[in-house]
Amino acid sequence: MRKEYETVIGLEVHVELATKTKIFCACSTKFGGAPNTHTCPVCTGMPGSLPVLNKQVVEYALAVGLAVNCQVNQHCKFDRKNYFYPDNPQNYQISQLYLPICHDGFVEIETEGGTRRIGIHEIHMEEDAGKLIHDEWGDASLVDFNRSGVPLIEIVSEPDMRSAQEVIAYLEKLRMTIQYLGASDCRLQEGSMRADVNLSVREAGAREMGTRTEMKNLNSFKAIARAIEGERERQIEILEAGGKVIQETRRWDDNKGVSRAMRSKEDAQDYRYFPDPDLTPVEIGDDWLERIRQARPEMREEKIIRYQKEFGLPPYDADILTGWKRLADMFEETTALCGKPKEVSNWLMVEGMRLLKEQGMDGDGLSFSPKNLAGLIGLVEKNVINRTVAKAVFEEIFRSDVDPEAYVEEHGLKVVNDTDALAKAIREIIAANPQSVQDFKNGKEKAAGFIVGQTMRAMKGKADPGLVNQLVRKLLEEAK
């Protein structure tokens, strides 16, 4: 009989910060540049080059640390983490081991069992490595140093999570907090937020930790959840067979649903850390720290309350709209333009979320102009177009950010309010459907609905539904 096991999980979350330049040089951090175009002697590790710390990196790290209830090391410093890898041009990474900028924090997450507090061991600043591109056809690997020197914070949790669901709730809370602070866009698909999962299992009720493994190559919440379930089962199978789990780093293959060993797990002494001799310690004064506290923007929990009070939105709407900062920004900017918060909410939550889901995107994927959504709402409000047409126009706004007024004019989509033209079309449809006339006179309301539907189809959805309903009933009553 299989024993009961408990999963113990801790995360190392790497977040690329939203600075315009790298942590120790003036090279651009913009994503998607041609390989090796955002580089200089500092970020490619040329001999004699010297790093200069980007102040904005420190301020973002402090803002995140304060938002997740951390203590701040007001005297912190950088260390060299020594290792050789082709994407690491200096043969060391500048990081923080002995005095990280933040420590001993926590976030609270909502689970099926209620609110849980997940401890944060530390947050430290460091530089990112370059990127290896493996050419399968040429049997070679190429190195792009554009990412080398991009500023990171690494958020190291305590081993407080017990399931994939708790891990995803923790990551979503971090992502949301960091996005609202403006410290990072946290786009997993672009690598600006990455998570390494440290996982072990132990018999239920045991106090001693099991042997942990670390899983890398996780670039989506779904992949993280699958990797956790896969690694949990792998470790349990080893223990059930009488074996021992090896402490190692593993790479998760999401396509095949398996992990593979990469290397034995290193400890701090393997990296031979020592203080970086080229960087002076960072002194964070009380005044500087207070300025960071005072500059904190409105966070999600505060927006939820304000949306209900200021805009009269139901709690459900407020919760959905604030789930992504981009979605909240779109709502606020559009509402400011058109003054109709509930209409804006309905368009974003119904049609917007539907299209995002169809495209496999999240709320951060909205890229159209608030002005165009406000313009669409105005066209519906003035009865220039009906809601059926408006949905089709919204799809064009979503995909191509078209100007709704120009698009409606160009495609002849304005509401048909010509009573004579509508009456003529309805009479022709009634004449072609004598049974519907009889059914209507016998009290069957669906008969009128059928004629309305046929009329709207004949008018290509451009007729005023209210006017069509009115005329259909009048003409059905007059019909013999």
Image (cartoon, grey):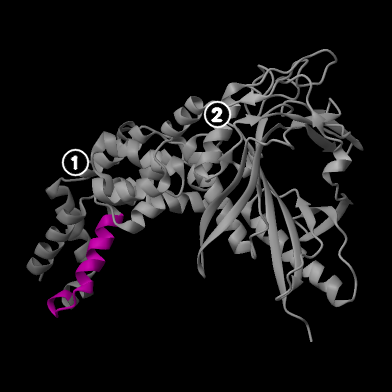
Looking at the image, can residue 136 be seen? no
* Amino acid type, callout 1: Lys
Going 32% across and 51% down the picture, which residue do you hit?
346
Q: Is residue 416 left or right of residue 61?
A: left
2 vs 1, front mark = 2
For residue 59, the mark is 2
Q: Which residue is mark 1?
A: 382
Taking the magenta stretch, the answer to whether it contains residue 449 is yes
Provide residue 464's location: percent of width, then percent of height.
20, 51
Q: Position of residue 374 (x, y in %)?
A: 30, 37
SS under mark 1: loop
> Toward the viewer: 346 or 278?
278
Q: Is residue 472 magenta?
A: no
Q: Is residue 243 above or below residue 406?
A: below
Q: Left or right: where does residue 204 sit relative to residue 82?
A: left
Say few, some or many: other residues with alpha carbon within 10 Å of mark 2 (under 14 / 14 to 19 / 20 or more).
some
Please tell me the numbered disc located at residue 430: none
Q: Residue at x 88, y 41 (%)?
A: 270
Q: Main secondary structure of the magenta part?
A: helix
Q: Position of residue 334 (x, y in %)?
A: 32, 37
- Which image quadrant is residue 128 in? top right
Residue nearer the viewer, 437 or 314: 314
Q: Residues within 10 Å of mark 1 (few under 14, many from 20)?
A: few
- What's under tag 2, amino acid-wise? Glu
- 75 vs 23, nearest the viewer: 75
Residue positioned most to the left: 478
Residue 216 in view, yes or no: yes
Stretch in magenta: 440-457
Q: Secondary structure at mark 2?
A: helix
